[in-house]
Image (cartoon, rainbow, N blue to C red):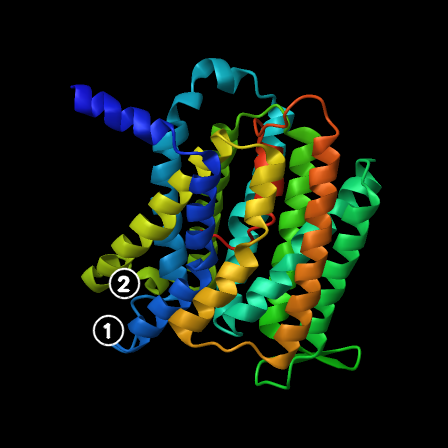
Amino acid sequence: MASQKKWYRSISNIPGQAYLWLAILIFGGSGAVTRKLTEIGAENLIDGRNPISLCNVLFVGNFCGLMVLMLIYGRQWNKASLRQISRKNWLILIVVAILAGAISPSLIFQALELTEVNNIILVGRLEPPLILALSFWLLGERVNIWEVVGAIAAFMGVILAIFLQPPGQEMMNLGGFNLGLGEILTAIASVALAISTIISKNYLSQIPIGIYSIFRTALGTMIFFFTAIILYGSEHFMDIFSPFLWQWMLLYGIVIIVLGQSFWVQGLRKSSVSVASLVASFTPVTGILAAYFILGETPTLAQYIGGSVILVGVSLSQFGIWQKHNRRHTPDSIKSAPAQQEIESEIGFKGI
């Protein structure tokens, strides 16, 4: 009994930053791991079908993520909390769930089929500058000069990463420019996430994180599932119960979903907004390293140039965030769904 109490005490003494760093290492590698799993599935076809297709990974991964969120936040789903949510807020939650829980992840998974993981990581950096610009424009939030300069630099880095790409097979001509289809889908996904974050900040500040997270994941998964059936037919998920799929999805679910989400939630509970945002900003670095070691993706010249400018922008933005929160007399905390969603915008793709 004494040893058990000592173990619990040692666990509770782990700083929030440690949990956040572990989560970022896991989330950063989620894109590379997802691509690797689909490659393994392509080498082990079932009647000509890839059992570890991106649609199967997204659906099963979201299902595992939902189970984890229910274990962590299930208590928040009580009658007292649910009665406090108005019909208007439920409708807004539905819109946010469609944008952030269905459209955005579907586009990211589709982009994984068309372009390199590094491109998805870099183009996904559009989200934080968009959120900053929309917050200032639509919500009238105050921003400091460092955040503005950092956002502009990050945006320019993304533009460079997109337009300096060498010609490829999956390209679209827009206004005389040849742009990669995967990069375009990732950019659209970033816009959808930015809009959902702005909607959350304006209307859902009083919604408990647990209700928001579970509802978004559950509804987003359902919409994705039925949309895929309508577009591709019911046979699209005929390998969803394949033992070969599940033996790999158990690994994916335990590491990427269970451990990643658990570490992230625990870290958010014990950290401030500025600290969590700073740690989350390192996700692109861990993602590019994971793509190199897992997939052997060596950054191209365009990715080096765009990525370097993005890192400068992220550094300036983080200095601005630290400066803004350091001036407050009370510690900043993460107690609302919008606050969590804005921090998660620094991460980008998390595997679900």
Position of residue 317 in the picture relative to residue 228 (left or right):
right
Residue 87 in the image, given as x and y percentages of width and height: 61, 24
> Is residue 108 shown left or right of residue 317?
left
Q: Quadrant of residue 246?
A: bottom left
Quarter of the view holding residue 303: bottom right
Element at badge 1? loop
> For this rendering, which residue is in front, 67 or 318?
318
Which amino acid does the dot numbered 1 rest on? Answer: Ile
Disc 1 or 2, which lies upstream in sequence? 1
Q: Which residue is mark 2?
A: 239
Name which residue type carries label 2. Answer: Asp
Alpha-carbon span between mark 1 and mark 2? 8 Å
Q: Are marks 1 and 2 in contact (CB under 8 Å)?
A: yes
Question: What residue lies at 52% left-to-right and 50% top-to-bottom?
Answer: 102
The x and y percentages for residue 204 are 63, 29
Residue 273, above or below 59: above
Horizontally, residue 109 falls left or right of residue 90, namely left
Note whether 13 is above or below 127 in the view shown: above
- Label 2 crowd bin: few (<14), some (14–19), many (20+), radius 10 Å: some
Query: Where's residue 193, x and y in %?
Result: 62, 49
Residue occupying the point 36% across, 27% down: 12
Residue drawn at x 73%, y 52% is: 316
Please tell me the numbered disc located at residue 314. Answer: none
In the rendered image, residue 272, in percent from the top left (x then y), is placed at 58, 32
User: Which secondary structure lies at badge 2?
Assistant: loop
Q: Which mark is residue 46?
A: 1
User: Measuring 51% from the left and 69% from the top, which residue is drawn there?
Assistant: 117
Residue 96 appears in view: no
Quarter in which the N terminus is drawn:
top left
